[in-house]
Image (cartoon, rainbow, N blue to C red):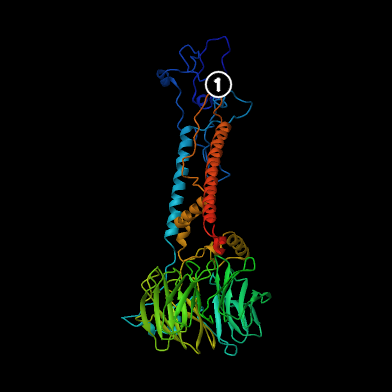
Amino acid sequence: VGEMETAPKSGRDVPPKKDKLQTKRRKPRRYWEEETVPTRDGASAGPPCNKKNRELRPQRRKNAHILKKSRISKKPQVPKKPREWKNPESQRSLSGVNPGPGSSPLPRSKAKTRSRLEVAEAEEEETSIKAARSELLLAEEPGFLEGEDGEDTAKICQADIVEAVDIASAAKHFDLNLRQFGPYRLNYSRTGRHLAFGGRRGHVAALDWVTKKLMCEINVMEAVRDIRFLHSEALLAVAQNRWLHIYDNQGIELHCIRRCDRVTRLEFLPFHFLLATASETGFLTYLDVSVGKIVAALNARAGRLDVMSQNPYNAVIHLGHSNGTVSLWSPAMKEPLAKILCHRGGVRAVAVDSTGTYMATSGLDHQLKIFDLRGTYQPLSTRTLPHGAGHLAFSQRGLLVAGMGDVVNIWAGQGKASPPSLEQPYLTHRLSGPVHGLQFCPFEDVLGVGHSGGITSMLVPGAGEPNFDGLESNPYRSRKQRQEWEVKALLEKVPAELICLDPRALAKVDVISLEQGKKERIERLGYDPEAKAPFQPKPKQKGRSSTASLVKRKRKVMDEEHRDKVRQSLQQQQQRHKEVKAKSTGARPSALDRFVR
């Protein structure tokens, strides 16, 4: 058993003995070695080239890649994949020559490029579809209030609503007891986040009413008649007893505008940066807050002005007068754009909805009317109130609120585009004092009421717009975002001359003015320059039809035609002068001859 077999010497033709151990320990073939097939003669026949030689290849053992379990490590061993060797001849550049040693970049296949482009196009199309759906399908929905089993919603009080809503909404209902400085006027910022109010006895304050964080609180030691936020919550306009004052959000006085004196009401036009003021002297003044200049000062010729509202759709100011009329004003016109006879007595309050379609008015005749502003200016509905409404306001969703003494009534319609129905009130609330100011909070179901006892914040389901434009009015914007928005708004400021009744008319051609300008031009020149077709020179050869030569020939013909027309007009004038001179010599001279042309 123990004798070892020795290899045969080279020269002797002795076939090697076959043994199982030798077969198992055979050296594996390397990639640089050619596979040989043993023949009967013991010589190698070369690499197999035909399909018939596949049967002569040595078959790979089934357990060639199965490794034994290690006694030291118990981790499962993954069999290593055989290394793939690339053909160096296939690694060439696009020009067909290998640039140097190392791996050269392989050109991408056209099929792969096409598939990647198709995938990118599909992703882009899907992204655009999702963006369009996100614009149309807004996340929030407007709220509403419904009674159980036909219950009248006007009988539901604020305490019941506060108990039914969540904690965050219930915190929006509060009362500020400020009886010693009342009555109060209030105003919300455009984002609906900040509240400013001013009392008749000089108390002025501004706060973030959501977090109840006080921004500033001062006493101007003078009667405050109205208060308004400007383009942002950083500036505040206060109509005091004598003049108009501008404050910042820290309560520091920035400006005192003495040209606006005895101001009773304030309105701010956000897209035009105009502050409109109505005074006791009967003047309507427009102040451009971006440059600090007065754009227009219009005399309404109707006595004291204490009823004013703006149309958010076209920025037209509505003024109520003591003779029962409502006049519509623009800074581009010295006369009112329209006058509407609304009541038999004086007008007490005016309000216009956010779409600019409906106008609500109340007068001394105790009537509440809703007018259609789409060219007809006819009343759509009328209701007689027991005490008359002293203050009116529209919400973003079309709800109408009226303040009658210490009672607040709210009417709702079928939707945002429909007028409110005056038959049955939607909500009713009684306050601790007479109402002095009303305004709905933007993007919130909240109504702010200023009265003689302070400030009351009411919950009105379905009043505010649930979705806001983050680029236009973002309640959660930071200081940096507000500054960037101010710069953008100043660049997009609309000139005051473009305020008119129909903003869509700005995109149309004014045919009447165009024809009038054409007539004036003909009278000034003495001929119609557009009557004859322009001269078109004929093309010439040998380089004489260049652009410079064509322009020169056109100008020469135009100058000749102009000389002929001027010569004819001069001859006509001389002939008329001769006729006039002949008539004057024949007749007796008169003192009126000096007026003869």
Q: Which residue is mark 1?
A: 33
Q: Position of residue 239 (x, y in %)?
A: 60, 79
Q: Please tell me how many numbered marks the rendered image carries.
A: 1
Q: Position of residue 591 (x, y in %)?
A: 57, 64
Q: Residue furthest left?
A: 149
Q: Position of residue 358 (x, y in %)?
A: 41, 72
> Residue at horizontal 49%, vertical 52%?
518
Residue 476 to residue 53: above or below: below
Badge 1 local density, few (<14 within 10 Å), some, or many (20+)?
Answer: few
Task: Inspect this view and state whether residue 559 appears.
Answer: yes
Residue type at mark 1 is Glu
Residue 316 to residue 175: above or below: above
Task: Inspect this view and state whether residue 398 appears.
Answer: no
The quadrant where residue 362 appears: bottom left
Q: In front: 133, or 339?
A: 339
Q: Position of residue 181 (x, y in %)?
A: 60, 88
